[in-house]
Amino acid sequence: MSKEVRNIENEFDSLSVGKLVLRLGIPAMLAQFFNILYSIVDRIYIGHMPAGADMALASIGVCSPAFTAITGFASLVGVGGAALMSISLGQKNKKAAQRALNNSFMMLIVLSVMVTGILLLVKRPLLYLLGCSDAMYPYASSYYTIYSLGTIAVLCGTGMNRFIMGQGYAKHGMMSVVIGAVLNIILDPVFIFVLGMGIAGAAWATIISQFGVMIYVFCVLGGRKMPIRIGFGGYDLAVCLRTLSIGSMSFLIIFLDNFLIILLNAMLRKYGGDLGDSYISYAAVVQSVCVIAVCPAEGITSGCATLFSYYYGAGNSKRVRKSFYYVLLVCGIYLGLITLATQLVPEFFVRLFISDAAAVVQTAKFVQRYNLGLTMVAVQFAFVDGFTAMGMVKEAIPISFFRKGLYVIAVLVLPAIFPLEYIFYAGSIADIAGSLFTIAMYFLVLNPRLDRLMKKI
C-alpha cells in the first residue's frame, strides 16, 4: 500500500470528526460561493449587452434545464463513483478504489459523446418545448449549440472533481471551481463586448472555462501525490452498475428539482391571470435567492461525503454517526444565519437580480415566505447526502422524496384555497414538515439499524 494512502487513512482514523468536517466541508462550501459568483456575474455581463440583452437573458433561461441535465449526468457518475472509491479506501482495498475511478472515467467519456449527440439532434424541438419563441430562437440556438459542444468538459471536469474530493483533497476541489469562475469572469467581457460576439461570446467563455477546469482536474488526478490516480483498464460491468445505483439519487434530485420549478411556474400561470408573467418573474428571483442560500450548504455535504463513504467502508458506525451530527451542526449554523438574513433583509438579495422598486418590495415578501423553514433543510442535506454517500440509496429515497412530495401537494393545494401569493409558503411547509419526518425516520428507524446495515458490506 502506498505512502499516500496510509497518510489519508491516518488522517481519517486519527483526527477528530469535527476537525475533518471543517477541513473538508469549508473549502467545498467556499467553492460553491465561487460557483454562485460565476453564475451571477455571467448574467450581469449579458444583461448589459448593448443590444438584445433581454432576449439573451431569456434565451439562457430557456436553455438552462437542458444544461442542468448535463450536470445531472456528471453527478450520476461522479457521486456514485467517488462514493464507491471512498468506501473501498475505508476497506483498505486500493485495487477496488482504482477500478471505481477507472470505470467512472470511462463512463463519463462515453456519456459525453452520447449526450452531445442527443442534445444537437433534438435542439430545435427541445428549445421550443422549453418555451423558446421564434424571436428568441436565434439567440437560444447559438448559445445552446456552443454550450453543447463543451459537454465533455462539463461532464469530465465536474464528475472527476468528485474523485479529488473523495480522496480528502478539498482544497484542490475548491481550486477547480475557482479556476472556472475566474476564467469565465475574465473571458466574458472580452468575448461579449471587445470582440462583439454577444450571447455566443458568453457561451464560448463558459465552455473554455470548463475545459480549463477539466484540464486542472486531470492534472491533479494524474499527479504523483494523488493516492488513486486517473487511469484506464479494469473495466467491470458490476462496478459500473453499482456506481450508477449510488449516483442515481443525486441524478433524480436534480431532475426532480427542475420539475418542481416547472410545476410552480405552471400553477402561477394557471391562477395568475393577467399577472401570471409577473408572478413567474417573482418566482424566478425567489428561486435564484434559494440557489445563493442553499448551494454552499450542499457544498458542505458534498465535501464531507468522503467521510461517510470511508467510515462506512471501514465499518466504523461510531464515526458515521458523528459525521451525521457534525455535518448537521455546520450546515445548521450556516443555514440559520442565511435564514435570518432572508427574513431581516430580503431586499438585499432581491436587488441582486431586479431594480424596480415595486417589484423588489413584492418579491422580498415572497422570499421571506419561501425561506421561513430554510434552517431545517440542514437535516435533509446531512442525512440524505450522508446515506447516499454510503451507497444506502434505499434509505435516502424516502426521506428525500417525502419532502418533495409535500412541496408538490402544497403547490397544487395552496392556490386553490388561498390567494395566489400564499403559494410561496410551499417551500417552507415542505422544508419544515419534511425535515421533521427525516428526524423521526433517523432516530426511530435508521439509527437503530445502522450497525446491522453496515455489516452487509
Image: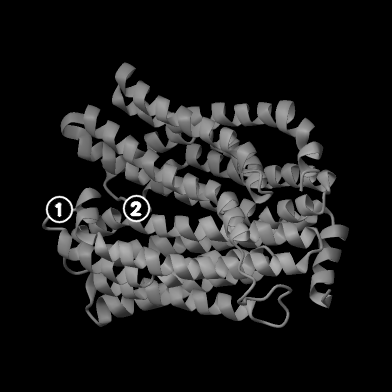
Give the alpha-carbon distance from disc 1 to disc 2, as whole Å: 16 Å
The quadrant where residue 196 appears: bottom left
Up the image or down, 387 lies above or below 95; here it is above
Please rate how many residues cluster around mark 2, counting C-alpha atoms within 10 Å: few if below 14, some from 14 to 19, many from 20: some
Q: Earlier in the sequence, mark 1 or mark 2?
A: 2
Q: Nearer the viewer, residue 386 or 425?
A: 386
User: In the rendered view of the protein, which quadrant contains the N terminus?
Assistant: bottom right
Horizontal and vertical percent position of residue 261: 36, 41
Up the image or down, 446 lies above or below 43; here it is above
Task: Tell me the kind of residue under disc 2.
Answer: Pro
Q: Residue at x 39, y 31 (%)?
A: 424
Where residue 65 is drawn, which disc sits there?
2
* Secondary-structure class at tag 2: helix
Q: Nearer the viewer, residue 36 or 210?
A: 210
Please rate how many residues cluster around mark 1, counting C-alpha atoms within 10 Å: few if below 14, some from 14 to 19, many from 20: some
Q: Nearer the viewer, residue 302 or 117?
A: 117
Q: Are marks 1 and 2 in contact (CB under 8 Å)?
A: no
* Residue indicated by mark 1: 133
The quadrant where residue 20 appears: bottom right
Count up the numbered dots: 2
